[in-house]
Image (cartoon, rainbow, N blue to C red):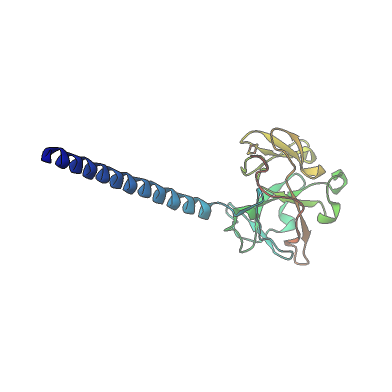
Amino acid sequence: MVDGIDGDKREKAGITRRRFTLGVIIASVAGAFGSLFALLKVLSPEKKGGGYVTTIQPGDKLVYAKGGNMGAPLRASSLNVGDAVLAFPAGKSSNPANLVQVIKLQETEFKPPMHLNLTDRGFVAYSAICTHLGCTVSWVKNQQAPAASYTECFCHNSIFDPSRGAKVMGGPAPIPLAQIGVKVADDGTLVFTSDFTGPIGPQVG
Ligand code: FES
């Protein structure tokens, strides 16, 4: 009888130890996930309502987002018809959602649903974040016919028409890239003139 009671105590003590160990493991895993989530949140743009939150204000100057001129003001004279560059608003490159693609085209090529009032002298800008799953878009320049150049996201080959408000011409992107106003300032640099016309970032899932 004594052995039976001792056996019960030993068994209960064993269960308690196993539960405690399991609890420690669960707490550790949860802590690790919490840290990982916090890290990803720091590395990712802020999200709101399925899209990314941007911090561009009218009057912000555009600066090169990469390359040897990274951080330098973007001058209108540096782009010819058929050229495009990635740009950030000055001092706000820490938010990836602020990335835009600035394109120089023939103004006569612009067609609806392009917001003509958000363009200046052939310059037009769109969000550079693909509306499918959020990759950065690229510029495909047509050397023979610069006006026929276009924007493509190479992640899943979505194609956007820069002359028609970044309308989706192919691929899985569900909506166009949002347009944002730009103009050439008196000193020849490019500045933003508005907020985006639509949501930024992935619009699926
Ligand atoms: S993320 Fe751009 S096409 Fe899929």
> Residue at position x 75%, y 43% from top?
176
The quadrant where residue 180 appears: bottom right
In this view, the residue farthest toward the left is 2
> Residue at position x 62%, y 40% from top?
133
Q: Please give left or right for residue 64 compared with residue 82 in the image.
A: left
Whole-percent x and y of residue 73?
Answer: 66, 61
- Compared to 92, does 6 lie above or below? above
Where does the C terminus fall, quadrant-wise?
Answer: top right
> Residue at position x 26%, y 42% from top?
15
Q: Please give left or right for residue 41 compared with residue 85 in the image.
A: left
Q: Nearer the viewer, residue 66 or 197?
A: 197
Whole-percent x and y of residue 42?
Answer: 51, 55
Q: Nearer the viewer, residue 182 or 58?
A: 58
Residue 120 seen: no
Whole-percent x and y of residue 186?
Answer: 78, 67
Where does the N terminus fall, quadrant-wise?
Answer: top left
> Residue at position x 62%, y 60% from top?
72
Q: Please give left or right for residue 195 compared with residue 10 in the image.
A: right
In this view, the residue farthest toward the front is 1
Q: Nearer the viewer, residue 67 or 133?
A: 133
Whole-percent x and y of residue 126?
Answer: 73, 49
Q: Please give left or right for residue 182 compared with residue 44 in the image.
A: right
Rendered-image quarter of ligand 1: top right
The quadrant where residue 58 appears: bottom right
